[in-house]
Image (spheres, grey):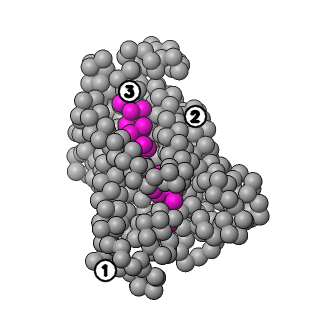
Amino acid sequence: MPRSAKGLAIARPDPNNHAVCGSFEFGSCVGYSAPTQSAIRQDLKLSLAEYSMFGSIITIGAMIGAITSGKIADLIGRKGAMRTSSAFCIIGWLLVYFSKEAWSLDIGRFSTGYGIGIFSFVVPIFIAEIAPKNLRGGLATLNQLMIVCGASTAYLLGTVITWRTLALTGILPCVFLLVGLFFIPESPRWLAKMGLQKEFELALRKLRGRDADVSQESADIQASIDTLQYLPNARLFDLFNGKYTRAVIIGVGLMVFQQFGGINGIGFYASETFVAAGFSSGKFGTIAYAIIQVPITPKKCPDPLRALPLPDQIPITMVIAKSQVYIASFSIGMGAVPWVIMSEIFPIHMKGLAGSLVVLVNWLGAWAVSYTFNFLMSWSSTGTFMIYAGFCALTVLFVVKIVPETKGKTLEQIQASINSLN
């Protein structure tokens, strides 16, 4: 069980366990298109361009979700935002399940995109706001792990069930989340910001444990909130005020480099990418991709792999090894860290507006990569991956020169240190 900074057990049920159902849903939505590409194109007679639109329109919905996510989370709370997101995802999956034409398929995909656009903002924010400082990084990384698990589950299930049935499985994480939200507290920082003092203290005590001494943490949060009374309401123009410029550059820059490393192009179309690499069945590649996303790799291939046709004259181990290095590196680094940093660097009165901008940039990049991937691969597979490699190299320079270390600091300390560098 997670423990507070003073070693006291956090009260059950653990809110992180419920919140990351949203992350699992995020992964399920993103991973849906990879194992279903051939079946959907065949059943609905979609061209490559039409399927590329279906695969990438989720990111357009997510962009709009990102634009509105901060406002929704500030207005109705972090829990209210997660409920709203779940509702859009459920509606979207049902539309996909009942689709007979490309337009209804796209609307459903767009709706799930809007939902995960909100999830991608509110889940890491909620985790950062409720977690003790010594656990915040690890718990925020759990967000990325659950995204990976959701995508891997979609990849694996998509090889053995129909694309319509797979759509129905995407509803389950939302149902678990909606039920779980009845049993967990709201973000104490949001409650304090809204002036709900009694609810703020109850929520903080429930999170830290009945016997925990929360007086210092409560005072620090309240002092930070009190300073907001003397500040005007946040406006978009304020993001470019010198006081917040460095935080915006860090947040936006990390999201740009995360996406242009190519992860969503590879993830959205994993099945066809492995076919292009020489595997005679897209299912083998999809299952292999799903396995290597999870940090603990099985010692031997699962039984379904033995029944699938493998490529002749192709160095299988090299293909899988390279994929393993790429996915593992992404998952422990640029997959998780930008979301952690985004949730830490902005003060609470700017978090909604700034977080929306950062998440919007992330989904703009995701759309650009996912929509152009198939066309770039048709141009040159080598050239495509060289472009992504170039962005990965630039990421190293950006992190070394610009991004601060946030380990072991409270949110208020992180924000103060960034402001001191402006």
Q: Which residue is the site of mark 3?
A: 249
For discs 2 and 1, the disc positioned in front in the rendered view: 1
* Magenta region includes residue 172: no
Q: Are marks 3 and 2 in contact (CB under 8 Å)?
A: no
Q: Residues within 10 Å of mark 3 (few under 14, many from 20)?
A: some
Judge from the rendering whether residue 353 lies leftward or rightward of residue 140; answer left or right. Answer: right
Mark 1: which secondary structure? Answer: loop
Q: Which residue is the site of mark 2?
A: 67
Q: The disc labelled 1 sits on which kind of residue?
A: Lys
The residue lying toward the viewer, choosing from 179 and 299, is 299
Q: Residues within 10 Å of mark 1 (few under 14, many from 20)?
A: few
Mark 2: which secondary structure? Answer: helix
For marks 3 and 2, give the CA distance.
18 Å
Answer above or below: position of 413 versus 36. above
Q: Residues within 10 Å of mark 2 (few under 14, many from 20)?
A: many
Give me the disc on residue 300. Answer: 1
Answer above or below: position of 112 versus 38. above
Expressed as whole percent of the image width and height from the top left, the position of residue 63 reads 57, 39
